[in-house]
Image (tube, rainbow, N blue to C red):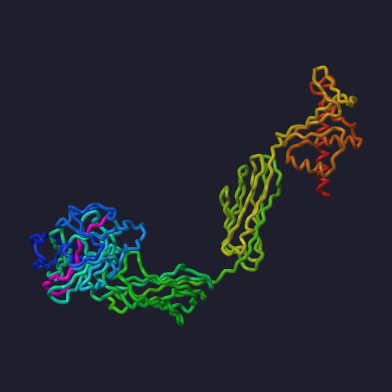
Amino acid sequence: MQLYRNLASALLVAASLPVFAANTVQTDEYIAVWFEAEEFDNKGIRWVLTDADTEQTEDDPDGNHSDSASGGQYLEVLPDYRVTHEDAFHPDGSLWNAFQGPELTYSSIDFPEAGRYYVHLRAYSTGSEDNGAHIGLAGDFPPQARRMQWCGGKHKWTWSSAQRDSGGNGSCGLEKTVYIDIPNPGSHEINIQAREDGFELDRVVFIKDLSGNTRVCSPNGATQISCVDGSIESADELINLRVRLESDIAEVESGGTVILSAILENLDAFDHATEVVTEVTLDEGMTFVAAPQECSHLAGVVTCELADLEPTAPGENETYEIEVVANAEGTMTAVAVASALETEQFPFNNDSSVSIEGVASIPDVDLQIEMQANATELNLADEAQISITLTNPDADDANGVQLVYTIPDGAQIVGLPSQCSGEGPVDCNFGLIAGGTSQTSIFDIEVDAVGVQVHAASASLNNELDPSNNSDTVVLVVADPASTPVAVVETDEDDSDSAGTDTGDSAGNGTEDSSSETQTGGVGGTTDSETGSEAETESEVDAETESQGVGGISGGTSEAGDEMAEAGNIPEGGTQEANSGIGNSSGGSGAAGMIFMLLLALFASLIIIATRQKHRSA
């Protein structure tokens, strides 16, 4: 409920009254009883009178404010230990509840009439830790007069009549929520206690409404009272409870866990709800598991009890989380009902329900993936087929099966299965794969770059038991046959010089004897071997050929020539003559030499391929 009503017609009116010249001022709209803070009869030791002559000390970090105080004086609780929220609490006290803090006593304050007086204090606040006080009557501090709060008006003298956390307005509270009920006309003792150290107090005013709650009157400046049209809501012993029941999920498999949250609020501005009871009745398909310690469970009903629920600030509530297991299929409904000792003003929001859909549980399966290529050694512009097989070896179905095929640089898709789309990565949606079946998909690709390519695929599904075997790869090696050079062997023309004597040809080219190293070139590097040495084993030849990749002969010509020499096919070191024909008059140049060299290279390549196939078949 709003504090002020009919604000559209409200008009601020400065009362035609004299400056506070007496302890009591009375008009047709209000009675005001006021006094200066320094007119106390007794005070606690930490209350310090401050005026223009008070010296600045470390105990008062925010300085002297007497120049703007009424009468040039005020009281402050010193030392001010806790200035910011981050400062530690001091052993001598920095924050007090009612009945505990440094006190000021005003023994004889005259009230002309009995009734409800709203309390206004004029205080100076510079932060969040010097802005609270408690008001008492004859040593008693009733709940509605505790925890007066200042939020706005920092760094100046400011009036407040707001109780902390009142009116559902958070910690700042609402104005006109701190009051004292005076039991009879006459003199009464008033008590004021600091809630926080560093609190500074200048003046006190008690205001009673005489307008029939049609005007709201408050202090204005140091010495004026102003009134506006409107009314004040006060404690009327009516409450407004609201309960909401929520679930963390809307659908759950049979046997799954559900968290129900019963959210309780008191939407009344001033009245506390006491002996609050919240009952949550579970559906027959729900099994109770756990609840907070203030809750109990009996026969499907969870009962949570709360002694007192203050007016609820925005964003704040009392929440009970109840854990249950859903055991049924179909709709399951839980119902929450809240009640309290006080009369409920709006009972329509005292109950709430939530429904959950139970579905049959889906058993887990262990889907497996295998990726293969119809060829792993390719030349530029070749096409290949990549097959990806998803196998469900279990009896139950695999649900929501999806596949992602990641295509590396140097390859492109030229053909896709109907369930797939994209160019890289490719996404496929297979939906369901029945138990005991497989799904094979063929992807047509074309390679357009030389090198090693790693093609990868991964699968996902709704009911996977073991995702560790849901991915696979296949490696392709791509070569450019046009870039493979013919092997060339450089040898000595005359191998009769066993001492390694160099001889020169007519063109001035030097040659080495038969004991020199033979160098052969090819894709993948240069391999050295000595001519005339024993031939390598077949496994060594095969391993050497494998290490060079596809599309070239690397170091193989010299070794093959040695094998042929050892077998008696050609003279040992015969490959030396093949080298002498190009630009070398001593070796016999011309077409015959060139043809012989090409035939020899071709023959050596055939020997290597035959040896490799023999090794693999073995």
Give the tally of numbered discs: 0
Question: Image quadrant of residue 16?
Answer: bottom left
Residue 262 at x, y = what percent? 40, 72
Location of residue 383 (image quadrant)? top right
Q: Nearer the viewer, residue 123 or 172?
A: 123
Foreground: 3 or 123?
123
Q: Is residue 54 magenta?
A: no
Say if residue 84 shows up in the picture: yes
Q: Residue at x 22, y 70 (%)?
A: 136
Residue 111 within the segment the image draws in magenta: yes
- 1 displayed left or right of 373: left
Find the residue positioned furthest to the right: 568
The answer to whether 5 appears left or right of 474 in the picture is: left
Residue visible at 70% across and 49% down in the picture: 374
Tell whether 361 sits left or right of 209: right
Judge by depth and name the residue closer to the eye, 54 or 599. 54
Image location of residue 540, percent across then percent down? 81, 42
**Residue 148 seen in this snapshot:** no
Compared with residue 99, is residue 74 higher up or lower down, i.e. above or below?
A: above
Where is residue 509 drawn, in percent x and y? 80, 20
In the image, which residues are magenta?
106-126
Q: Quadrant of residue 307?
A: bottom left
Q: Quadrant of the N terminus?
A: bottom left
